[in-house]
Structures are given as structure tokens and as C-alpha cells.
Image (spheres, helix red, strand yellow):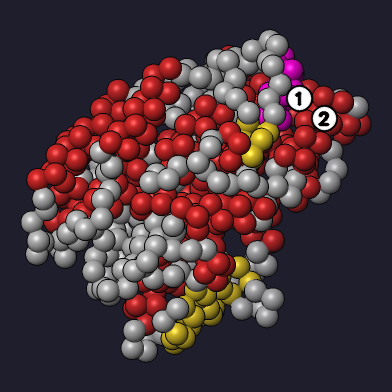
């Protein structure tokens, strides 16, 4: 490091790191309680009304935290952190950049106190090469596999051009970009052939190709955290699922019991985390490239574009127009395998309580729940149900919700610990003057990602206490057994940073 950090930074770092470490050490997974008998209905209101200071009018959030979810300790901890952020901001202008030796920078930020609590970020194989990572590999074997799609002209692309519509901080590179891929059928892989970005248009191997790759990697990292994880999973889907379930499925209804472990705590956590991340000077605006206004615009725009089909890997693949069996798709295969266990569970469970599609259609509680989901989730859930209520369509939807709350939340959130921290290969912001990111931004990025890995209720546990009868209890137990069987199967495979196995999964998106 060329410049010595000032003493005031050392003090700030000690305070903020201690807060992070204390939360991690003392945060323990909660037991998920049964649904309450007579919940008071929740309303969805704009975030700007619920949290003054977050000027996002088109994103909706519950009007309050329901009784039973609210945790005094968690509220006090967030309130303290927000207050501390005002009196002792964790990020201030003018601090030196991180060390040029990335391993040294990582050891300094993720010191032994962090490592004693959680394994330090591990470089994905694709980040071990000299130069920038192979985007062809990233498009099928990384969390960024979710961005691959076929465009109107039949090209396979990552399309981040919309990111240019939102204001970035002065001195940072705009992220609007597009990567074109071609299929190498013989090698069964994808190759990135062309990138368009603010620097111009580049073909693979040309001068400054690596710089264009850096732009695309930064766009991918930004999009996954802000759009897919927080706006998509938490706000567009998780929040409405929880409101619709509380409002429309009475506590002893079989579907309420099926969904409850995967949505409990959402309003508490969405409210507090939105405050911590989206208020002025919160995590999002100080870590990523967008100004507060730019970030708010991005949330408004991308919320409207949410598609429920992302909750079902096969449907999602189809909707993105992707070809079948032309190249290897390790991430897609991994996601589909996890989804199938969830789908088998919801199919078995629904078949216990409904002996025909007509019986399910006659259940006005289910009809009201689906109507509410269609109203509250941007663009509704017809993408998943096909617009009809059958045992199969409802099983697909319920499996999608379990998959969203566990697998998607992991793939787009906690899994980023091993990707997003390697800012030499995967920057969170790019300074146009060529400097690396400042030490305080890097530390905040680390603390934010570290926090995603706190101890939370695991998916692999016996949820049979949610059952309304013996048959339901057996279905919950069977789900747990099948997750364990898949865990044993995947455990035998070589390590890959992108691979998700059942033991990594949490039951829901909440802290
Ligand atoms: Fe999350």
C-alpha cells in the first residue's frame, strides 16, 4: 500500500469490525414457530412511505412487522448500526486504495478474528488464472449463469445495457455492457466473442479485452446483489409471498403449514435490511457504483421487470430461450437437481390433501391465496402456474417458493462470499482514474458479505411439527430424508465454488 491509512480509519475499522464480529458470534438460528391463529392482515405500501429516506415509490413492502416476527435484539442492533453510520460513517472519501497484492488485501480485511468464525473467501478456480476470468466459463459455471439468455436476434448474451440508465458516482465507470457468446459444440462450452461497453466494442483477444471483461464482471456483480438478490428475492417475491400467505391461508390450512417455514420472519428482516442497505449512505450506495438516486431508480425499474419463472429452473431456462444439450450447464444442472427434491416434496404433500384437481379448485382459500400472489408479485405467478389451479401447477409454484427462499437466496447472496470479495477479478466498482478500491469500501463489502453468512434456520431439518396430521408429518420427514440423500450424493463431488448442496441452504431468506 503506497499510502498509510490515517489513525481515524484505524479507529473506525476497529469499531465497525467489532460490530460485525459481535453480530456474527452471537446471532443464532431461530426456532421457526407455528403460524398464529388470528393474524391481523398486512397491507403493501410503497417503500418510500414505509421508510422515509428511501425514495422508491414503485417497490412495495408490508405496512408493519407482524407480532411474533419482531425481534427486539435485531431491531436494536440495526438501529444502533444506522445511528453509528451517521456519527462514525464506515466509508469516508479520500482513504487509500487496497493493497495491489490481493491476497494481502484480503488477509488485512478478513483478519484472524473473522477467520476464527467463518472460512475466509476461497478463490473460485476460474479466478486463479492470470488475467481476467473466462466469461464463457462464468456464463455456465458461476452464480452469473443466471444472466445467460438468447436475444431477439438469436445471440447468446449477457445484457447489462440497462445499468447505463442509472446515475453512478463521479469518477466511477458506467456499467452498461453486453457480452456475446458462441457455442463451441465440440468442446461443449461457451466462448465469449465480443463485448460492448462504455470503453467501446472489443473482440476476444484484442487489446483492452481484459478491461472490457472487468466491466462486464463488475456489472454482473452489481446486478446480482442489487437486482436479483435484494430486489428480486427479498422485495419482489419474498415480501409478497409472506403477506399473501399471512392474509389468505388460515393457520391450520395445509398450504399455510407447507409455506410457513419458508417465509417466517420476512417482514422483520426486509424492513430492517432495507433500512441498513438502502438509506442514504447505506451499504448499497457506498459499496456499488450507483448514487443514492441511481440505486433507487434501478430498484424501481427492475422491480417491475421481475418474472416469477426464475423460481423454476426448467421454466427459467426456457423463458431465457436457451438451447438444450449444446453445451455443458453445470450450474443449471445443480439448480435443477435441488429444485426436483423440492418439487417432489410439494407434489407428495399436495396429493395428500387433494385427491383431484377439482378438489383443489373448490378450495376458495387456495384460490384467494393465488389471486393475492398474482396481484402482489410484479407480473404475477401465471408464468409458473400457466394461469390454472391444478395440483401440478400449485406443486410447481410451492416448490418454486421453497427454491426461491433457499437455493436462489444462497446462489445470489451468501454464495457471493467466494466471488464478490475477489475484486481484482470481479470488481464492485471501477475507478476511471485506474486506482483500486479504497480500503474502507473493501472492508464494508467484506462486512456486508460476512453478515450474509450468520447462523440461520437450516433447510435440512425436521419440519414435521408443522404438519396438521400424520400423513403431513411423514411428507415433511421424507423431504428432510431426500435432502440428506442429495447432500450425500453431492458431497462426493470435487469442490466447485458455484455448487450448492442442501446443507448450505437456509429454510428462508431471513436473519
Ligand atoms: Fe438476503
350 vs 254, nearest the viewer: 254
Name the disc covering residue 431, or none: none
Q: Nearer the viewer, residue 95 or 100?
A: 95
Residue 499 vs 435, above or below: the answer is: above
- SS at circle 2: helix
Q: Are marks 2 and 1 in contact (CB under 8 Å)?
A: yes
> Which residues are drawn in magenta?
243-256
Residue ID at (29%, 58%):
422
In the image, 343 versus 384, the foreground residue is: 384
- The residue positioned 41% from the left and 52% from the top of the image is 285
Judge whether residue 247 is colored magenta. yes
Badge 2 is on which residue? 368
Residue 52 higher or lower than 253, as above or below: below
Q: Residue at x 56, y 56 (%)?
A: 297
Position of 19 with respect to 172 (left or right) is left
Q: Is residue 394 visible?
A: no
Q: Does residue 151 appear in this view?
A: yes
The yes-or-no answer for disc 2 within 8 Å of ligand 1 is no
* Residue sitting farthest toward the bottom: 206
Q: Which residue is mark 1?
A: 248
Q: CA distance from mark 2 to mark 1?
A: 6 Å
Identify the residue at image location x=68%, y=10%.
37
Q: Residues within 10 Å of mark 2 (few under 14, many from 20)?
A: some
**Could you say where residue 402 lies in the image, as x and y percent from the top left?**
60, 36
Task: Measuring from the top left, give residue 240's x and y in whole percent.
Answer: 66, 36
Count of numbered labels shown in the rendering: 2
Rendered-image quadrant of the C terminus: top left
Mark 1: few, some, or many residues within 10 Å (few <14, many ≥20)?
many
Amino acid at each position: 500500500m503506497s499510502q498509510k491509512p490515517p489513525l481515524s480509519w484505524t479507529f473506525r475499522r476497529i469499531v465497525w469490525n467489532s460490530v460485525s464480529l459481535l453480530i456474527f458470534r452471537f446471532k443464532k438460528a431461530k426456532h421457526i414457530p407455528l403460524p398464529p391463529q388470528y393474524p391481523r392482515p398486512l397491507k403493501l405500501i410503497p417503500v418510500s412511505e414505509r421508510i422515509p429516506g428511501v425514495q422508491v415509490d414503485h417497490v412495495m413492502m408490508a405496512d408493519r412487522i407482524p407480532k411474533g416476527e419482531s425481534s427486539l435484539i435485531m431491531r436494536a442492533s440495526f438501529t444502533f448500526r444506522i445511528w453509528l453510520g451517521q456519527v462514525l460513517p464506515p466509508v469516508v472519501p479520500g482513504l487509500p486504495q487496497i493493497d495491489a497484492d490481493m491476497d494481502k488485501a484480503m488477509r488485512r480485511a478478513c483478519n484472524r478474528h473473522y477467520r476464527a468464525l467463518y472460512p475466509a473467501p476461497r478463490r473460485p478456480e476460474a479466478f486463479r488464472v492470470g488475467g481476467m476470468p473466462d466469461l464463457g466459463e462464468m456464463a455456465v459455471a458461476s452464480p452469473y449463469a443466471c444472466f445467460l439468455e438468447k436475444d431477439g436476434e438469436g445471440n447468446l448474451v449477457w445484457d447489462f445495457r440497462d445499468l447505463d440508465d442509472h446515475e453512478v458516482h463521479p469518477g466511477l465507470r458506467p456499467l452498461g455492457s453486453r457480452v456475446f457468446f458462441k457455442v463451441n459444440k465440440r468442446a461443449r462450452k461457451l466462448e465469449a466473442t465480443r463485448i460492448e461497453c462504455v470503453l467501446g466494442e472489443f473482440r476476444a483477444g484484442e487489446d483492452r479485452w481484459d478491461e472490457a471483461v472487468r466491466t462486464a464482471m463488475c456489472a454482473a456483480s452489481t446486478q446480482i446483489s442489487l437486482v436479483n438478490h435484494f430486489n428480486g428475492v427479498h422485495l419482489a417475491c419474498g415480501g409478497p409471498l409472506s403477506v399473501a400467505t399471512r392474509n389468505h391461508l388460515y393457520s391450520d390450512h395445509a398450504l399455510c403449514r407447507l409455506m410457513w417455514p419458508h417465509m417466517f420472519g420476512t417482514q422483520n428482516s426486509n424492513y430492517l435490511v432495507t433500512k441498513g442497505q438502502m438509506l442514504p449512505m447505506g451499504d448499497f450506495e457506498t459499496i456499488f457504483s450507483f448514487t443514492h438516486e441511481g440505486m433507487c431508480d434501478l430498484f424501481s425499474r427492475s422491480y417491475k421487470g421481475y418474472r416469477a419463472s426464475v423460481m423454476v429452473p426448467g421454466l427459467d431456462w426456457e423463458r431465457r430461450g436457451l438451447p438444450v444439450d449444446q453445451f455443458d450447464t453445470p450450474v443449471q444442472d445443480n439448480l435443477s437437481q435441488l429444485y426436483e427434491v423440492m418439487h417432489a416434496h410439494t407434489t407428495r404433500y399436495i396429493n395428500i390433501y387433494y385427491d383431484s384437481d377439482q378438489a383443489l379448485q373448490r378450495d376458495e382459500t387456495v384460490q384467494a391465496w393465488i389471486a393475492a400472489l398474482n396481484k402482489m408479485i410484479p407480473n404475477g405467478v401465471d408464468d409458473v402456474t400457466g394461469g390454472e389451479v391444478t395440483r401440478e401447477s400449485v406443486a410447481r409454484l410451492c416448490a418454486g417458493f421453497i427454491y426461491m427462499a433457499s437455493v436462489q437466496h444462497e446462489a445470489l447472496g451468501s454464495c457471493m462470499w467466494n466471488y464478490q470479495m475477489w475484486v481484482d477479478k470481479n470488481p464492485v466498482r471501477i475507478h476511471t482514474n485506474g486506482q483500486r478500491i479504497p480500503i474502507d469500501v473493501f472492508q464494508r463489502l467484506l462486512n456486508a458479505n460476512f453478515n450474509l453468512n450468520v447462523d440461520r434456520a437450516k433447510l435440512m431439518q425436521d419440519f414435521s411439527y408443522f404438519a396438521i396430521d400424520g400423513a403431513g408429518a411423514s411428507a415433511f420427514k421424507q423431504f428432510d430424508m431426500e435432502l440428506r440423500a442429495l447432500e450425500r450424493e453431492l458431497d462426493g463431488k470435487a469442490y466447485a465454488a458455484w455448487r450448492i448442496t442442501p446443507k448450505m441452504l437456509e429454510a428462508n431468506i431471513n436473519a
